[in-house]
Amino acid sequence: MDLSGRVALVTGSGRGLGLAYARALAAVGASVVVNDVDRAAVDAAVATVPGSIGVVAAVGETESAERLVAAAVTAFGRLDVLITNAGILRDRVLWKMTDDDFDAVVRVHLRGTFTCARAAAIRMREQGTGGRIILIASPAGQRGNFGQTNYAAAKAGIAAMARTWALELARSEITVNAVVPIAATEMTRSIPAFGPVIEEAERTGEPFPAWLRRDEGLGTVEDVTGLITFLASDAAKGITGQAIGIGGDRLALWSHPAEKAVAFRDGGWPAEAIASSWDFPPETYGIPVPRG
């Protein structure tokens, strides 16, 4: 892949997955705008991403989104790729989750994705040369996850926005896809089945075991970057509106919601008729318990 001459903006790229995305894009020639809320994290990231600039900003508000896009244009003359990676967690079960817990996560993940994508789309349409918008989703948004009402709802909304924007931006040759990554991060480290394995691999320098990389699809943050680089390139110009999972040794295309079973009854469905006829096979829900 060669992204020479392309300009990418990666939100939440001071550490973790976002930093891995920024480094991977720079490695194939892209100029990168690094973003984080933490000045020290931005400065450290810029030092490891060749030719990048850093912008300290909390995503969510329109002013921040417009400032990030303007920084890319001022420094590099254009914007070709947006990756909306910024996020926070405020995990609690429903009956303990506060309004602030809910609003904070939705503001960063969902509203932040919206405001940044809107600002980027305006700029890309003005340029008239197409573009790539890559939204970072999550298995929690695809299946639900215990204790993550706010996060799962925001990530599900992000996948829905990818499909909607793919329709709206198609004529402008701007593709929009949702990436569903699974990688060894601070969040996955907290999962009891994963934490000890991740820590042992970091201690010994040995690769993750096959059951983790293949069965669970979990690897390093660098394992996710190939999909990001691909979707940012011309090779992916025909791919849009998709939710694509990646992690470890696994690459997967998530299905979109669709009717699984349908029944008909002349005159409609009163409650009693539904009760006497219900035989739909139930859908599973929740992220499966790791098998390792």
Image: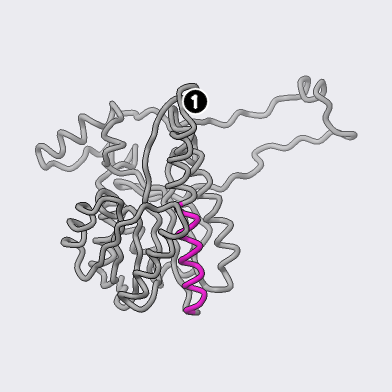
Main SS of the magenta part reads helix
Q: Nearer the viewer, residue 281 or 118?
A: 118
- Toward the front, the furthest residue is 63
Q: Position of residue 223 (x, y in %)?
A: 27, 51
Q: Position of residue 203 (x, y in %)?
A: 10, 37
SS label for mark 1: helix
Q: Position of residue 45 (x, y in %)?
A: 21, 57
Q: Nearer the viewer, residue 228 or 111?
A: 111
Judge from the rendering whether residue 176 lies leftward or rightward of residue 36; answer left or right. Answer: right
Could you classify mark 1 by the number of other residues whose Cα lies within 10 Å: few (under 14), some (14-19), or many (20 or more)? few
Q: How is the image coloured?
A: one colour
Judge from the rendering whether residue 45 lies leftward or rightward of residue 271; answer left or right. Answer: left
Q: State which quarter of the image contains the N terminus.
A: bottom left
What residue is drawn where x is 64% and y is 39%?
A: 260
Judge from the rendering whether residue 157 lies leftward or rightward of residue 250; answer left or right. Answer: right
Q: How many marks?
A: 1
Region in magenta: 112-127
Give yes or no for residue 135 being in the magenta stretch.
no
Q: Nearer the viewer, residue 243 or 154?
A: 154
Amino acid type indicated by mark 1? Leu
- Toward the left, the furthest residue is 204
What residue is drawn where x is 36% and y is 52%?
A: 58
What residue is drawn where x is 34% and y is 43%?
A: 182
Q: Position of residue 136 (x, y in %)?
A: 41, 51
Residue under circle 1?
94
What residue is drawn where x is 56% and y is 67%?
A: 169
Give yes or no for residue 122 being in the magenta stretch.
yes
The answer to whether 195 is drawn above or below residue 141 in the figure is: above
The answer to whether 149 is drawn above or below residue 24 in the figure is: above
Q: State which quarter of the image contains the C terminus.
A: top left
